[in-house]
Image (tube, grey):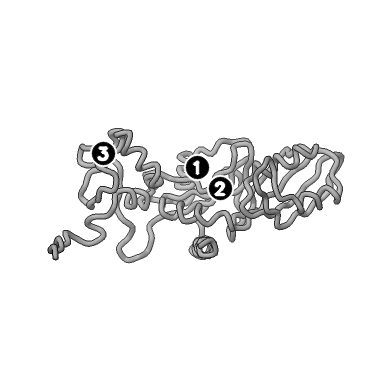
């Protein structure tokens, strides 16, 4: 038998490069692999091979700029942060500006590093956006999002009746892509403006827009007000952000874990 090579350290002393950087919020594993292939990411001044291991003392740069890759707190208490942002419709998602505003309002002491948007909405839409500095958490939520309940509020312009709302509830596709409508409740407004509250699963906001446009109504506003167990409350003004509470964070991760288990 060939003798086993002696261990050179624990998981913190040498961890796979992509895993460590993703957990530190630098980027997704796929992005990191692409940066390595392009020669943009270097470890101790050299481009590493894919799958290389990274030690705590190694110096990492991306496009020549230092990258922090310290692990999470050793006590098991995560130092990562998750922000809930209320974005106005039509405004681009400027992550750095949003995090800076939140840091000032919440007195966050550390906001440097790469922040990621989890399942961001198209720029034309608005409402609830979730940002995190934890790449592993972002990946976990993204893997489970297809089974989460997502709630939108739409403002429609045109002639809306109950028969059309019922047709939307029964819809199974839009633009050739599958849709799953869990609930839809319409409320007629003044003139030709109406409101519709929609709950979907595994259905992008753009598909909802396309369905109504194809049936002669214009979606003049679309707001995401719930993302799984996380709800956008009236207490958070547009353009402002807050940290998720520990309970909200646990609930989100629990729902995503259950979603992953159901897909196995």
Give how far apart the Cα atoms at labels 3 and 2 are: 32 Å
- Which residue is drawn at the image coordinates 26% and 43% (left, top)? 49
In percent of width and height, residue 137 lies at 44, 55
Q: Against 182, is 35 above or below?
A: above
Tell me the quadrant of the picture where the N terminus can be found: bottom left
Q: Residue furthest front?
A: 1
159 displayed left or right of 139: right
Q: Look at the numbered discs 2 and 1 and tell me whether their residues touch, using CB distance below 8 Å.
A: yes
- Name the mark nearer the viewer: 3 or 2: 3
Task: Name the residue rendered at 32%, 36% in the picture.
Answer: 37
The answer to which of 164 and 122 lies nearer the viewer is 164
How far apart marks 2 and 1 lie (CA) works out to: 11 Å
Where disc 1 sits, the SS reads helix
Q: From what the image shows, is residue 261 above or below residue 86? A: below
Image coordinates of residue 116 in percent, x first then y, are 46, 45
Looking at the image, how many numbered discs can be counted on the residues? 3
**What residue is pinned by disc 2?**
129
The residue to which callout 1 is attached is: 98
Q: Which residue is mark 3?
A: 42
Tell which circle, 3 or 2, labels the residue nearer the N-terminal end.
3
Badge 1, how many Cα within 10 Å: few under 14, some, many 20+? Answer: some
Of 189 and 7, which appears nearest the observer? 7
**Residue 255's x, y, as percent?**
54, 63
Residue depth check, mark 3 versus mark 1: number of the one nearer the observer? 3
């Amino acid at each position: 038998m060939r003798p086993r090579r002696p261990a050179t350290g624990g998981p913190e002393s040498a961890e796979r490069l992509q895993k460590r950087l993703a957990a530190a919020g630098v980027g997704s594993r796929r992005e990191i692999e692409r940066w390595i292939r392009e020669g943009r990411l270097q470890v101790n001044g050299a481009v590493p091979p894919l799958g290389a291991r990274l030690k705590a003392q190694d110096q990492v740069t991306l496009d020549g700029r230092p990258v922090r890759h310290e692990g999470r707190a050793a006590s098991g208490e995560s130092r990562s942060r998750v922000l809930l942002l209320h974005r106005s419709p039509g405004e681009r998602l400027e992550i750095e500006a949003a995090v800076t505003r939140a840091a000032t309002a919440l007195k966050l002491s550390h906001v440097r590093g790469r922040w990621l948007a989890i399942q961001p909405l198209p720029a034309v839409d608005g409402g609830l956006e979730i940002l995190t500095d934890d790449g592993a958490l972002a990946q976990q939520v993204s893997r489970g999002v297809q089974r989460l309940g997502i709630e939108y509020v739409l403002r429609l312009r045109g002639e809306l009746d109950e028969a059309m709302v019922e047709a939307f509830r029964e819809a199974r596709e839009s633009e050739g892509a599958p849709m799953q409508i869990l609930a839809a409740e319409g409320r007629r407004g003044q003139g030709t403006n109406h409101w519709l509250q929609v709950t979907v699963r595994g259905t992008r906001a753009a598909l909802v827009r396309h369905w109504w446009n194809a049936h002669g109504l214009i979606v003049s506003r679309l707001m995401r007000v719930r993302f799984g167990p996380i709800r956008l409350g009236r207490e958070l003004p547009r353009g402002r952000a807050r940290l998720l509470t520990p309970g909200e964070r646990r609930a989100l991760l629990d729902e995503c874990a259950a979603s992953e288990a159901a897909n196995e």
